[in-house]
Amino acid sequence: MSYEEKGTWAYLVTSVAVWLGYVVVVLRRADGGPLAEVAYVAPLLWAVGISIAANVVGRVLFEIVRPSESYRVDVRDREVARLGDYVGGLVLSVLVAGVLVLALVAAPHFWIANAIYAAFVVQVVVSSVVRLVAYRRGL
């Protein structure tokens, strides 16, 4: 497994795990009440920060457990990244249009902020899955 593929796995796993943790925190804070009234800003900011840190730690752990033979990015890595970024960007564009609709209808900030966060997580999942499939099956 190449260094870049390991990084993709770390990015996928940490992003989804932290997002799920954030959802659990928000649902617990709601305690059966309306979600739009939950104090979500601090947990959301913490989730973003933890996601970044966890990605770095995950990538380092991958390298400790299974060191890569090379850290050089080759043509295949660049093409796989380009394809993943392209497909992920398309997905993000569509989802952001949905967030724009939420803003235009004056939805509560809770829904807009969480839709943005969810859109980024979906983009990470789609982009990462496309990359991993490209690594395993070829372009």
Image: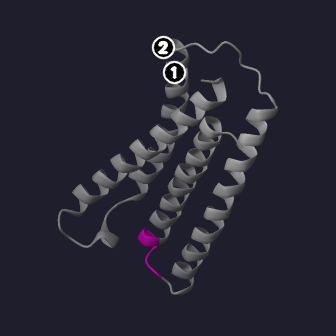
The location of residue 38, given as percent across then percent down, is 31, 65
| Tag 2 residue | 65
Residue drawn 58% across the image and 36% down it? 8
Say few, some or many: other residues with alpha carbon within 10 Å of mark 2 (under 14 / 14 to 19 / 20 or more).
Answer: few
Whether residue 61 is in magenta: the answer is no
Residue drawn 59% across the image and 77% down it? 100
Under circle 1, the secondary element is: helix
Say few, some or many: other residues with alpha carbon within 10 Å of mark 1 (under 14 / 14 to 19 / 20 or more).
Answer: some
Drawn side of residue 24 relative to residue 102, left or right: left
User: What secondary structure is the stretch in magenta mostly built from?
Assistant: helix
* Residue range corresponding to the magenta coloring: 107-111
The location of residue 117, given as percent across then percent down, is 50, 58
Between 77 and 54, the one lying in front of the other is: 77
Residue farthest left in this picture: 32
Q: Label 1 amino acid?
A: Phe
The location of residue 50, given as percent across then percent down, is 46, 38
- Whether tag 1 and tag 2 are in contact, CB under 8 A, the answer is yes
Under circle 2, the secondary element is: helix
Q: Label 2 amino acid?
A: Val
| Tag 1 residue | 62
Drawn side of residue 25 relative to residue 19, left or right: left
Residue farthest front in this picture: 137
Give the quadrant of the N terminus.
top right
- Which of the 4 image quarters holds residue 26? bottom left
Whether residue 109 is in magenta: the answer is yes
Give the quadrant of the C terminus.
top right
